[in-house]
Each structure stands twice: as structure tokens, then as C-alpha cells.
Amino acid sequence: MNRREFLKNSITVIAGLAVPLSALEFINPKELLADKPGGEKVRWIFLVDTQKCVGCGLCVMACKAENELPYDADVSRTWVERYVVTRDGNTLIDSPKEGRDGYTSQKITMGDGTSRNVRPEDIEKAFFVPKLCNQCENPACVQVCPLGATYQTQDGVVLVDRKMCMGCGYCIMACPYAARFFHPVYRTAEKCTFCYHRITKGMKTACVDACSFDARRIGNLRDPNDPVTKTIMSGRIGVLREEYGTKPQVYYLGLSREVK
Amino acid sequence: MNNHVFRPLYLALAIVALVFLARYLLVPKDFGAHERGYMYGWHRKGNENEWKAVTVKYKTSAYCKECHDDKVAGISSSSHRFIACENCHGPALGHPEDPMKLNVDTRRELCLRCHAFLPYPSSGRSAIRGIDPEVHYPGKQCSMCHNPHNPRIPTSRS
């Protein structure tokens, strides 16, 4: 190998490394469906329609009661964000009390505790985005746990074992979606379980039952006749932070490019 | 053989044995890499059942139908038919034994979650008729004039 070839090859390799592996892997639910033929019968997935959400926050209220989180603690397994995009290109995002009490005022809470009012004629678009744990196929939070206190079940739900968790907080830092937090009572890592106690009994999650507008739906990716699976397969869906390569399994309809 | 060679060796062996004993005693029997393999599956199998055993608190509107047939029938022909009973009355766990009566929430805030006007044309909110809570009969309960189970607009305009 001469000097020229060596340099050329090195540059190719370096350029190749610079592309994150995840950037080459685009989310494809079909792949997941085809995976492991015959094996598991259930893979829970979630579908959020941001165009239908009205920001009433009843899902957050139901989630907190169903999953025994102190009602007034500023943490929640699911939350609703408000996005207001102004005509001059600013995106204002807030989620006071995680959206628990709904959005009843046009005042947007800013990070510093003040609030801002955007005149209706200055609003380009405004909408609500419900969020929850993405129950990733490749959950980064599970990989970093030093104890085996968090894991993925066979049907795709990531759970936390409160008896094993020592509260180191690695998983909370590792989650790209900020879906994890410390439980204010148990002081262990806490997250959405897709209401595992409900879905394993044939019920829907508390937030899905609370939603009057079908903005939240839960389904089984391995059932080709499941309406949620059909919507996902046929179409124009998005996921959050695809570039992290975690393969999130909460799909979004009508996702706007401002949503992070 | 020289004692000074073996003594540290015994000590090392004792420490290794202690680590194994501690592991045997501390790691639960059902701990291991289960279905999802070494990368994502390390856990205590029993924890899955602990999560499955959490009490269900919200019983869905189908449950109310057993006894409050009239209410369910009434609401199902109204524009509030999509709203689950427990959103406004709280989780039905234990009801009707304990608590005998569910909460009847008559605060304006409950209705304003959906009906406070917000100028957000690109969201689902724009499909719901909004009011300005500071102008629309402030201080009065909404259910004084609107039946929450069948909220037709009152004909007698005040």
C-alpha cells in the first residue's frame, strides 16, 4: 500500500465511522413484525394522533390515579406538551403540571417561571403532543442498568423492578425521551408500564380509556388485523428521535417537525 | 511446601468462596437472562407478576352500565358520548360498596379542560365549541345550565 492509497483508505474509514450506525437504520415496523417468526404472539405498540389531542389532560389525571403516583408531585408517567409556533419562527413549548389539569388558558409558561401570551394572529400553528415511554425495541435505559433492575418483557414492555433498583439514576440519564424519573415515594426509577396490569387482562391502558378523542390507542404489532397495526403498516407515521437508534414503539400521526 | 506461598492463596480462595456465597444468598432464584436475552432480558422473573398484580382502578364505562343504565343511555345520544364516566366521576374501584357514591365533580375546571377557548386551529381543540371562562357566567357551576350528560344548548337565552 503506498502513501496515497493509505490516506484514501483512512479517509473512507473515518467518513464511514462518522455516520452513526443508527442513521442507517430507519424504523420499519414490518421488520419487527417479520422478526422471530412463530415466537412471540404479542408486541405492544402505541399510536398517538397529535391532530386529535385537545389538551384536556384527562389521560394524565387517569394515569396518575391508576398507577398510584402522588397526585401533586411534579412527575408523571405520561404527559402532554403544548407547542405554539409563532409566525416569526419561534417554538414555545410548555407542560405545566405535566398537563394534568388540562390547558385552559392561552398563557404559555416559560422556563423562568414567567408566562407569555401569544396573540392569536401571531400563531402559525399550535397543537398538543401526548408523550409516554416509547417501549423501545432497543431500550438504552435497560442497557445501562448495572443491576438487572430494569428489563424488557417478552411482549416488549420495559419494566422496573423496585426491589432490585438502587436508585443510581443511570437509566434516567440514558433515556432520550426523558420518560423516566424517580418515584417520589419509593425513590426508585419509575416509568410507564403501558399499564401492564391492564393490558395483560385484556383491558386498555388507563390513558387510552380516558381519551375521548382516540388520540391515544394501543395495539399488538404481531396481529395483522389489529386496527392500530393496520394504521401503522399503511402509513404516514413518525416516531420521536429516530436517530438515536432505540427503535421506539410509540408511533405518531400528524407529527410536526418542531416536535422533539 | 512453604507456608508463605499457601497462606495468601488460601486467603484468595476464601474471598472467592465468600463472593459466591454472597451471590448465592443475595441474587434471587428466578434472576437470569429470560426471553429477551442477555442484552435486555436480565431480570427477576417474579417482578413481571408483581406488575401484573397492580390493582385496576378505572373500570371503564361498560361497568357503570350494569347499574346506571339510564345515565349511560342518556349520555350515549349526546355530544358527550365519547367521554368516559370515570373522567368526571373518578375511578370506580370499590364502588358501590366502598365508596357507596362516586364523586360528583361540579367544578368549572372540569368542563374548561375541553371548553376553554384556545385559538389553536391546527389542533383537535378547534373542533370543540369554546367559551371564555371569564365572560361565560363566571362563578356559576356549568351544570346549573348545562346537563353534563346531555349538554344541549339551553334554548332560553339569558
Image (cartoon, helix red, strand yellow):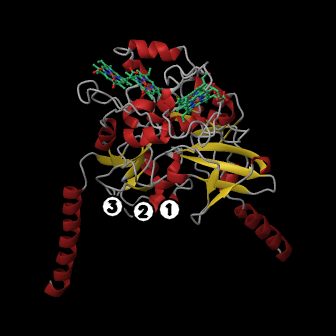
| Location of residue A205 with respect to B69 vertically, above or below | below
Q: Is residue A117 above or below residue A41?
A: below
Q: Answer with left or right where residue A203 lies relative to residue A244.
A: left
Indicate the quadrant where residue A226 lies.
Answer: top right
Circle nearer the N terminus (3, 1): 3
The relative height of residue A100 versus residue B81 in the rendered view (above or below) is below
Q: Nearer the viewer, residue A242 or B111?
A: B111
Residue name at image x 34 percent, y 15 percent: B67
Q: Amino acid at mark 3?
A: Met
Badge 2 sits on which subunit? A
Residue A165 visible to an observer of this rendering: yes
Of the pair A98 and B9, the residue shown nearer to us = A98
State the residue position of label 1: A173
SS assignment at label 1: helix
User: Are both tags, 2 and 3, on one chain?
Assistant: yes
Q: Image quadrant of residue A248?
A: top right
Q: CA distance from mark 2 to mark 3?
A: 9 Å
Pointer 3 and pointer 1 on the same chain: yes
What residue would you read off at disc 2?
A: A169
The relative height of residue B17 versus residue B123 in the rendered view (above or below) is below
Amino acid type, callout 2: Gly
Where is residue B108? Give x, y as percent: 50, 37
